[in-house]
Image (cartoon, rainbow, N blue to C red):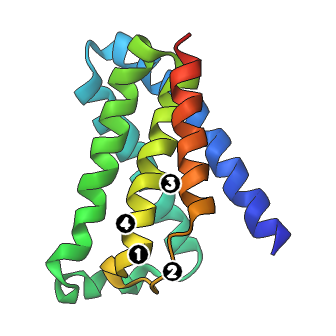
Amino acid sequence: MWWILAAVVLGGTAIAMQAPINAALARELGGPVPAAAVSFAVGFVVLLVIALAQGKGAVFLDLPKVPAWTLLGGCLGAWYVLTAVWGVSHLGVLTLVSALILGQMTAAMVIDATGALGVAVREVTPTRIAAAGLVLAGVILSRA
């Protein structure tokens, strides 16, 4: 299980690096929307190649059968990339990532508490609320 946590930590590292890289791309292309579109296109190609290499190409034929709401993940990802590209130049990487984590934790507690989106219900404890509060304090301190 430690390797899963390590992979997720590396994913967080990638997020911190992605925002300034995409902001540089936005400067080159003249705006955050084209940069976000290019970022998504490159990511799509990479993931498509990996899926094909794993022999999973045929699963894309099932796409018309999936519930429409499950495609909203792509919309949410686009919103994330766009706000990160736009926000990093105004907030800096530390505040941007801290604010993203605060948003993730807040939404995660609501999703855990309600079992929304098909996840198992998990109790929102005072410790979890305190964890989000500490991240909020980090956001505030990152602006000082």
Q: Are marks 2 and 1 in contact (CB under 8 Å)?
A: yes
**Earlier residue among tags 1 and 3:** 3
Q: Secondary structure at mark 4?
A: helix
Q: Secondary structure at mark 2?
A: loop
Using the image, determine if residue 130 lies above or below residue 93.
Answer: below
Mark 3 to mark 2: distance in Å? Answer: 34 Å
Please name the residue shown 59% across and 51% down the image: 130
Residue tagged 3: 46
Mark 4 to mark 1: distance in Å? Answer: 5 Å
Residue tagged 1: 113
Foreground label between 3 and 4: 4
Please name the residue shown 35% across and 18% down the image: 26
Assign the C terminus to one quadrant of the image: top right
Q: Are marks 3 and 2 in contact (CB under 8 Å)?
A: no
Residue farthest to the front, as pictured: 126
Assess disc 2: are there few (<14), some (14-19) or many (≥20) residues with their C-alpha within 10 Å of its C-alpha: few
In percent of width and height, residue 115 lies at 37, 82
Using the image, determine if residue 104 lies above or below residue 23.
Answer: below
Q: Secondary structure at mark 1?
A: helix
Mark 1 to mark 3: distance in Å? Answer: 35 Å
Left or right of 107? Residue 132 is right
Between 55 and 25, the residue placed more toward the observer is 25
Residue 50 occupies quadrant: bottom right
Please name the residue shown 19% across and 84% down the image: 67
Assess disc 4: are there few (<14), some (14-19) or many (≥20) residues with their C-alpha within 10 Å of its C-alpha: some
Task: Answer yes or no: is residue 18 visible.
Answer: no
**Earlier residue among tags 3 and 2:** 3
- Which amino acid is tagged 4? Val
Q: Are marks 4 and 1 in contact (CB under 8 Å)?
A: yes
Residue tagged 2: 122
**Earlier residue among tags 3 and 4:** 3
- Which amino acid is tagged 2? Arg
